[in-house]
Amino acid sequence: MAGKTSLNAPPKAAPAPARLPPPRPPKTAPAPAAPAAKAAPAPTAKAAPAPAAAPAPATTPAPAPVKDASADPLAAFAALSLTSKPVPTVFPLDALPKVDGADPASNVLDIFKLLITDQVVKFTGAAPAIVFPAVEAPKNSDLADFAIPTPRLRLKGNPAQITKDFVAQFVPNDFITGVVASGPFMNFSINKALLKTLVLSKIATTQEKYGINATGTGKKAIVEFSSPNIAKPFHAGHLRSTIIGNFVRNVLKANGWDTTAINYLGDWGKQYGLLAVGFEKFGSESELLRDPIRHLFDVYVQINRAAEEDATIHDTARTYFKAMEDGDAKALALWQRFRDLSIVKYKETYARLGIEFDLYSGESQVATKDMDEALELLKAKQLLQEDQGAQIVDLKKEKLGVVVVQKKDGTTLYLTRDIGAAKARKDQLGFDSMYYIVGSQQDLHFRQLFTILKKSGHDWADQCKHINFGMVLGMSTRKGTAVFLEDMLNQTQEQMLEVMKKNEAKYAQIPDPEAVADLVGISAIVIQDMSARRIKDYAFAWERMFSFEGDTGPYLQYAHARLCSIERKSGLTQIPPALDEIDFTLLKEPAVASLLCHAVSSTLDTLYVVNQEEPIKKARMLLYWSARVTLGNGLRLIGLRPLERM
Ligand SMILES: NC(=[NH2+])NCCC[C@H](N)C(=O)O
């Protein structure tokens, strides 16, 4: 399977990392604080309306810049500066206001937002922490590039009037070219040509790190996901947990968090007593070694069937589980083998998805000591009550019912184990946030868990979050046999292969169609899942998710592969081309600005690289290479491996 795949782990390192040349003031140096220092605009042919970025006179406060809707800020800018090759200087980030959550060093847009914040803060006296989050990208980008709904600044006075007054004294700069008042909205326009240049330069210098930031540095998160049950089917809920959980972990990592991914297996409880009894009756050592997950499931099905006829089997199972809970070495040895062998197999399958856990934990791993301590704590807080020999906690006041935390035979429950596990994770691993990625069927369970933790006096209960999701409907395949993740992936791969074979000519060119089908098939599943609203149920649609049209996995992978092919055919020896060889003014077509995934194919059809003159070739190659890196980074964040050929 691995062999000839054209996996594209991190983007290929450029032969020579591009470096920004030293600042070249004043022509290109952004001078937001001193707008007058800017080069004078070259007169344009149709010079009627003043270009939005017209410099303010040096001394008198700037008049309200009149933003003429017909003035193309791009054209105005092209005539204004950056007319020759120079790459804009790195912006002096120190000059920007410091705001929590803003990371201008990683996010070019934050530079623009902070420059807006700066002026608004200076004029209104509102705190940067209030202003910055109020700078939003409006839904309709025709009206503004950024907007602030003035009421969000929580100022005394009439918002519309404040807006007007602000606009009247606003000073445009290289970045923020203008502002107009629209009722209580400040509508800002920004220098899009500069944005484009900065973004491309940023991508070229950060490559596979483009898009990440450091806002989570020094913080630690635990992400618990997938968490299937040994000897039971890996159902669609586990698949969603796996996909969403992996994404949550990746996003946290990309934001600088230190993460620990935990797979909390369902590997404890009376059913493992039943499984052990079943294995004595129906088990096969060789089958267990060959395919533990499947064999244990078969045994489990058989013993459940047998127990329907013979109820004493349940008593035997209960006794067996009690022996496990009491630490009986013999009872535990068998269970330990089931667990170990299953984990080996799980790891193989997760590897196919490109997922690795830092920790295989599970209900079995929760120490008796931790649960006892948790019960003691509840008792000390007078939250524990006895009910027919069982220990219960009354959560009726919280509208969460009454929950059993210890059965009358002294054994624990799912909830008890979660209470003990949470405390142990806090003590042993530590975290600032802990995420449980589990379907919304368990909403009540997690509310009960967090409430009990809180009532026990753990202030960190608020750091625990349940990320829930809806169900996947109708995931059964044509064969209807997908019980395990492995089956699901195999059948997806098979069907993807069939889709690919329909295009014979292309199929013949793919070096390792099976590996490609596996990766594209997985992309199809993951993207379908990601396109659905998280808390909503969605229907699994084989046909649609394999389509090469619309926002599907195959479509995204195809876009990536096409961009890779441009690089191969470009004839350029250095990719990305060195930044100081790029003439950014050559990237002026509207298609450049719209180059996001949707537009990849249409842009590729209009802006060629092959057979172009060298400067155009280089500028466009930088553009396409940047699109490829960005798309690849995005796919990796989602948990996919971008393909170079398909
Ligand atoms: N800490 C937790 N309870 N995590 C969720 C575990 C999910 C459980 N194994 C199930 O399949 O339903």
Image (cartoon, grey):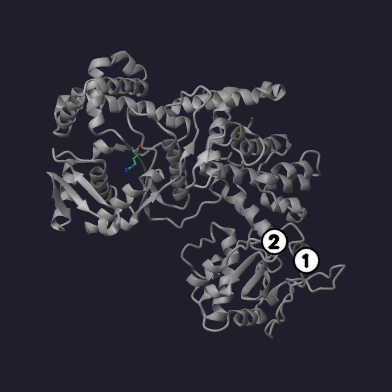
Q: Total number of numbered labels?
A: 2
Q: Which mark is residue 127?
A: none
Q: Which mark is residue 192?
A: 2
Is residue 357 rendered to the left or right of residue 594?
left
Give the amino acid at mark 1.
Ala
- The residue positioned 84% from the left and 68% from the top of the image is 44
Q: Label 1's element?
A: helix
Above or below residue 72? Residue 287 is above
Residue 119: % across, % down: 59, 75
Residue 332 or residue 128, whichever sits in front: 332
Above or below residue 497? Residue 587 is below
Residue 587 or residue 503, whichever sits in front: 503
Residue 494: % across, % down: 56, 23
Q: Can you say which quadrant of the picture contains the C terminus?
A: top right
Give the amino acid at mark 2.
Lys
- The residue positioned 76% from the left and 54% from the top of the image is 590
How far apart in space, not on screen, are marks 1 and 2 (Cα)? 10 Å
Is disc 1 surrounded by few (<14), some (14 to 19) or many (20+) residues within 10 Å? many
Specify the quadrant of the image occupied by residue 37. Answer: bottom right
Is disc 2 surrounded by few (<14), some (14 to 19) or many (20+) residues within 10 Å? some
| Residue 10 visible, this angle | no
Q: Which mark is residue 76?
A: 1
Above or below residue 29? Residue 589 is above
Specify the quadrant of the image occupied by residue 158. Answer: bottom right
Q: Label 2's element?
A: helix
| Residue ranking furthest to the right | 45
Residue 369: % across, % down: 16, 44
Residue 592: % across, % down: 72, 51
- The residue positioned 53% from the left and 38% from the top of the image is 539
